[in-house]
Image (cartoon, grey):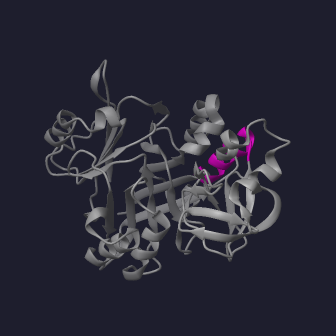
Amino acid sequence: MQVEQSKWSLNLGWEQLSNHQLREKAQLVLAFGNENVIKDEKRFEEIKEQYPKAEIITCCTDGEILNELILNDGITLSAIYFKHTQIQTLCIPVSKVKDSFDAGTHLSADLEKDHINSLLIFGDSQALVASDLLMGIGINLASHVPILGGLSTSHTGLNSIPKHGTVIGVGFSGDKLKVGHSVDQGWTTLGAEKTITKAVDQRVYEIDDKACIHFYEQYLAGIVSDVKSRVIEYPLGIKNIENSRLVRSMLEIHDDGSITFAGSFRNGDQVRMMKSSTHKLLLSSELAAEESIKSLGNTPEFVLQFNCVGRRQVLKDWLSEEQEYINSKFEKSTPMMGFYSHGEIAPLKAKSNSELHNQSVVFNTFCETE
């Protein structure tokens, strides 16, 4: 397995950061960037010319991660050559199917599933209910196959510039590829357990029979000056059967007091408000990086990181320090890329089902064995 990386900026154009002569060999290219540049047809044609035989995945993001760098106005690119691994790519336009669940069933049904050992997902956060997507994928995919990935700001593309309303799948097959994964949050509970008493998909109307915003006002009125502007800093944590929490970020407060979150709820879900701090978020990144190496069981040859944009809003001036801490856990020569996501997909632990996470950091580590 070999990876070469480059980046594009308005001032300098393309800069190659590593070169393994993968022009004709690369099977997969990941290109993440600011919407204003990654949707430029000229940039895509330049990528296609450089890697004519590769499957090219493009994503609009709210910030890109490339090794120790955090970028906002350009494009980051990793071209990957697998020596022993076969890949297959699929693109499902959500508008062509019934809903997100149906998109998931179509994607997993169309995969050639013999010997598949992992599935990587990129999706448009504005067009998908990702928790429903995962349930749909699970209909046709063996439970032992980890589903990993991240939701972009908006558009995603397969062998094209990013387009609205698409979900991209990359299936990896072969017994030489090892894939590790980890997820950590850095959030702790605040206040008492409450019950969702009225919810439709991602929109929560009532908690304990009162308007959702009332729940936040009850706890935050004496802590913050403007509750509505600070709700995003206090996500909800859904209690699951393993007594851990799936974190859900706030997306929109409605006039009727209901709130839309970045993930589905069901009536009867037990929830608590979550809080965090700079220290806890930095520590969670280090722990997740360490766990991804342990999960792989080998030295990573490539690292793919999805870091929630909500964490970025909390860390603010500490983002560079976070990335320094993360990079310190990997060998200096290990290529890493990723983006600030609007939803992260990974199992909570080994051999468990993949879940949609918010306010989390996810690492996927890859290597091929001889």
Magenta region: which residues? 276-289
- Outermost residue to the right: 222
Residue visible at 57% across and 62% down in the picture = 203
Where residue 183 appears, as percent x and y from the top left, is 59, 58
**As drawn, 97 above or below 311:** below
Image mark count: 0
**As drawn, 227 above or below 187:** above
Question: Of helix, strand and loop, which mostly describes the magenta segment?
Answer: helix
**As drawn, 9 above or below 182:** above
Between 275 and 299, the one nearer to me in the picture = 275
* Residue 111 location, quadrant: bottom left
Quick check: is 30 in the magenta stretch?
no
**As drawn, 59 above or below 214:** above
* Left or right: 221 as drawn, with respect to 66: right
* Left or right: 83 as drawn, with respect to 304: left
Viewer can see residue 188 = no
Where residue 265 appears, as percent x and y from the top left, is 59, 68
Question: In which quadrant is the C terminus drawn?
Answer: bottom left
* Residue 90 location, quadrant: bottom left
* Residue 105 location, quadrant: bottom left
